[in-house]
Amino acid sequence: MQYDIYTGLLKAFPLPETVASDVNFVCNHGHPKFDTLRDSYPIEAIAGDGDDFSKAVNLLQWVSSNTWHKGDYNGSVGQNALDLLDYSFGKDISCGINCVGLAIVLAECLLAVGVKARKVFIMPCSPYDGDNHVVTHVYISEMNKWVMFDPTLNAYISNEKGEYLSLLELRNHLADQNPIFFNKGAKYNDNEWTEQSAKENTQYFAKNLFYFQTSEISTFNDDAPGNRNITLCPQGFDPKQKKLNNIDYRMKIYNAEDDPYMINWREWAEKEEYHYCSAVGFEQNPF
């Protein structure tokens, strides 16, 4: 039933092909901190000398094999690959990081070796859903398209023909309730991957693919001031109001109406500006 509801929402609310927009997505490989990242971790050797896809797979497996996912990680270190790897790499689960951190690490490692990549927040429709997911979108130049990689699950996804899917392709595929296939080697931390794992995570993606948010400029520490957050969502859907309703919901269920953090968060959300792109713009080869 839940799968039908989530996929039904994707079917009923497609993402707009075109929309008036001044968005220009950029992947900046030239940040000086990428030199430090390459000197600190052997990411060039790990990526190898193959094509973009093989580099992405190699770095995905390296990140997933040497870090733990920890959903309640509190973001206590900087939101960049250097700080996150220094905190978590090769350590036990007490130093695990959340899906945001894992997506940042993979995206910035790829950018540092010359592959276009960005972290993308994939978001649910319901304002009463306190959970979302974050993945890494990688532009594979040889395929002339984006492919979704999920370092939380050491995963990428294909269709019945064996074609690797972008986020928009994955959304459309699930909207039609077509089957999807996870790569061999997909896993969550040290848990064995099973048919049930695939079924549960298929539903999880269906829940979280209602709309997308990503930075206009993908680079080291791209949450820096001045970098716009870009939203791709169904026409008529108001992501700002959804966020405000979600904060109100959290304040209610946690009896946190007087909590200073929640109050400040809501005030910030009320002032947040939204910038939108089309599905076509989201899928284009970035500069």
Image (cartoon, rainbow, N blue to C red):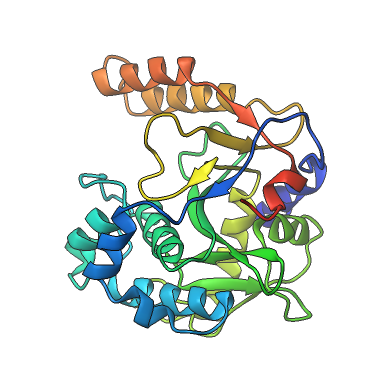
Q: Classify 205 as above or below 225.
A: below
Image location (x, y in percent) of residue 58 = 45, 80
The answer to whether residue 247 is seen in the rendering is yes
Depth order, front residue of 29/55: 29
Residue at horizontal 52%, vertical 72%?
155
Task: State left or right for residue 115 relative to residue 231.
Answer: left
Image location (x, y in percent) of residue 120 = 53, 50
Q: Classify 36 as above or below 274.
A: below
Q: Classify 244 as above or below 166.
A: above
- How many numbered marks, from 0 up? 0
Depth order, front residue of 59/115: 115
Residue at horizontal 56%, vertical 47%?
26
Image location (x, y in percent) of residue 212 = 60, 44
Task: State left or right for residue 87 relative to residue 230.
Answer: left
Task: State left or right for residue 90 relative to residue 277.
Answer: left
Residue at horizontal 75%, vertical 26%?
236
Depth order, front residue of 28/178: 28
Residue 140 occupies which quadrant of the picture? Answer: bottom right
Residue at horizontal 30%, vertical 22%?
256
The answer to whether residue 189 is seen in the rendering is no
